[in-house]
Amino acid sequence: MAKMTDATYPQCRIVPARFLNPETVEKLLNRLLEVGGIRKLVLNGQRIPPTVPYGPARGQPNPHPMRRVIRVGDQDVELQVQVGTILLELEDRAPIDGIRKACDEVFTKFPYSLSEGKFMKTQATVSDYAKYGPGADERILGTTDPKSRGGPLIIQGTK
Amino acid sequence: MAYKPQFGPGMSIVAQNRRKQMDPNHKLEKLRDVTDEDIVLILGHRAPGAAYPTAHPPLAEQQEPACPIRKIVTPTDGAKAGDRVRYIQFADSMFNAPCQPYQRTYMECYRFRGIDPGTLSGRQIVECRERDLDQYSKLLIETEVFDPARTGIRGATVHGHSLRLAEDGMMFDMLQRCVLGADGNVKYVKNQIGEPLDRAVNVGKPMDEKWLKAHTTIFHSLVGTPFREDQEYVEYVQRIHSLRTKYGFMPKEV
C-alpha cells in the first residue's frame, strides 16, 4: 500500500504517427536530455532480433538498419526495437512544456501525440519478484524487461 | 439469361476495386517489370536456372487410375510435369495496401487454377505447383495488386500489417527483407524467408498516397475510405449477419 509520504511522479507518453529511425530517436533523446527533469525513460516498439527467430532460416544473422547503436549524452545505447512509443517519468510537471517543444522540433514530417497519465508499473509483478527478489529497487521497475539479461541504462545527470 | 457474377456489393471506390480485381475478364494493370530470375530469387525455393525438382513422375509416364474427374479436369503445366508444391506469402499493410488477404484469395480463386490459398488476418499464402507458382507470382508482383512499400513478400515472420509505417513509408518488417534505396526504388535484399540474397532484387518505386487511396481494397477510416460511408456494403454485411444469427447455415428470408 502506498504511504502518505510516497511521492507520485508525473508520467508522459509520446506517440509519433510513424515508427522512428534510429537517427530521429537519437535526436529526440538528446533534446530531452537537454530539457532534463526525467527520472525514467522507456523506448517501446517492435523488437528486432539479432538472429532470425523462426522459419527455415532460423538462427541466421539478421542485419537490420533499425537495430544500431545510438549516442545519447555520453553513453552508447544499443536499440533493440524500432521505436514506436516513448514513456517518460518526470521529477515534476515543470519539464512538460520543454518536452513538447523538443517533440515539435524533432517531429516535423509527421504528427505525434503527447499525453500525461500513468504508463509504467509502480509495483513489482511476479516476473519482477522472480528476477529481483523481495527488496527490488522501485526505480528500475518498469524500465526494463525483467526476463531479459540486460538492465536499464543509467545516464548521469547534473544532480 | 446467362449468369453474370456480381463479385461483391458496394458503391465506394474500394468496393469497385475489389470487384475489378476479382473479375477474371478485367486485365490487371501492369506497373513494373520483374524478371523470372528475380522472382525465383525472392521465392527462394530453388536456384535460378535450376530444373524444377519433381515430387512424382510426369503424368504422361505413369499409370493413372480410371477416374471420371481426371478425364474432365485438364492438369496444369506443373501438375503435368510432377512439380513440387511450393508457396508465396504476402503481408498487406492496413494503410491502403492495394490488396488484402481475403481479397487475394477471392481474386486468385477466380483467376488461377490448381491453387490452395490460406487466408489469415494479416497474411495470405498461396500454394501450388512450382511451375505455376512462378507464373502466378509474376502476375501478383508485377501488376496493380502489389505495392513495394505496403505489400511484403514474407514466407516467415510476417508481423507488421497492422503497425504504423516507418518514417520512409515502408511497412515494418522484423527481418527487413526489402529496403527503400536512396534512388527511391525498393530492393529485396533477402528472400521471403529471410536468407540474404547474392544480389539485390529491384521491385520498383513505391506508389504515391493518391494512387494507393484510389486503388486500395481496404477500408480505413483515418487514411482511406471509411467503411461506414459505403451504405450498400454496410447493408449487405448487416443482412448476412442477421441471417446467420437467426437461421445459422440455412438462411430463409420470409
Image (tube, coloured by chain):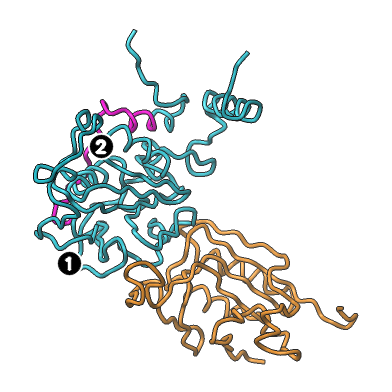
Q: Residue farthest to the right?
A: A4
How far apart marks 2 and 1 lie (CA) works out to 32 Å
- Nearest the viewer among B208 and A100 is B208
Image coords of residue A23 (percent x, y): 42, 73
Pointer 1 residue = B199
Q: Is residue B16 left or right of residue A72?
A: left
Residue occupying image coordinates x 53% and y 76%: A29
- Nearest the viewer among B247 and A55 is B247
The boundaries of the magenta stretch are: B17-39
Q: Is residue A123 visible?
A: yes
Residue occupying image coordinates x 31% and y 38%: B108
On residue B151, the disc is none
Residue occupying image coordinates x 14% and y 43%: B63
Question: Three-letter amino acid code at disc 2?
Answer: Arg
Which chain contains the residue that carries disc 2?
Answer: B
Q: Is residue A87 left or right of residue A22?
A: right
Image coords of residue B88 (percent x, y): 30, 52
N-term-proximal mark, 2 vs 1: 2
Q: Is residue A37 visible?
A: no
Q: Residues within 10 Å of mark 2 (few under 14, many from 20)?
A: few
Pointer 2 residue = B113
* Residue A113: quadrant of the picture: bottom right
* Residue B170: quadrant of the picture: bottom left
Numbered disc in front, either 2 or 1: 2
- Quick one: quadrant of the C terminus of chain A? bottom right
Question: Three-letter amino acid code at disc 1?
Answer: Arg
Tell me if residue B37 is in the magenta stretch. Answer: yes
Please say if A46 is above or below B141.
below
| Label 2 element class | loop
